[in-house]
Amino acid sequence: MSDIKQLNAALLNACTNSNINLGEIEKLLEKGAQPMGCVESYGNENLYTVVLEHFIEIAFDDEDDSAFFEITKLFVRYGMDLSKPEVLYYPICGASNPLWTFAFYSTETAMKSLEALLDNGLDADLASY
């Protein structure tokens, strides 16, 4: 497994762990982990979408999902660009567009996360592909 794939696997684990450590997530981002990198173990999905789906499940179970907003802010600070996924979105390659995935996530945390993405240059037209 390449170094970047190992970093991405560690980033995914850190973001979906029951005890989220934002410092650990930031260290992985500093080392070069890619929030829009491919996660092969999830059907060639982009990491941010897998993290998003994880927090949808948490919110569905009425658990605290507030860490998702902090993770999103960190990802944005380290240059995450939803318009540049490693695995192209469906129908081109089949990866889920995170903006479509947000349609199933309507908590306050989700809305704050979307706002942070929009405030940092996200083009709403991205939802069309």
Image (cartoon, rainbow, N blue to C red):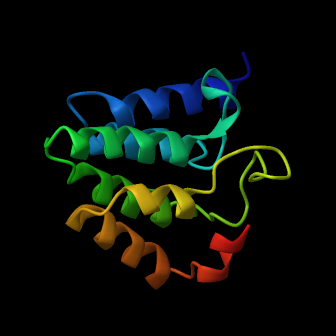
Residue 97: percent from left, percent from top:
63, 56
Q: Tell me the residue at 18%/37% (across/down).
A: 61
For residue 120, above or below residue 36: below
Is residue 123 among what the camera can see? no
The N terminus, quarter of image = top right
Q: Is residue 15 left or right of residue 21?
A: right
Residue 49: percent from left, percent from top:
53, 47
Q: Tell me the residue at 54%/64% (across/down).
A: 99
Q: Tell me the residue at 50%/46% (across/down).
A: 29
Residue 8, picture quadrant: top right
Q: Is residue 77 left or right of residue 34?
A: left
Find the residue positioned furthest to the right. Answer: 92
- Along the viewing direction, whichever of 101 and 6 lies nearer the viewer: 101
- Along the viewing direction, whichever of 106 and 26 lies nearer the viewer: 106
Residue 16: percent from left, percent from top:
35, 32
Is residue 126 among what the camera can see? yes
Residue 31: percent from left, percent from top:
55, 40
For residue 77, above or below residue 10: below
- Along the viewing direction, whichever of 65 and 32 lies nearer the viewer: 65
Q: Tell me the residue at 43%/42% (across/down).
A: 53
For residue 29, above or below residue 82: above
Find the residue positioned furthest to the top. Answer: 1
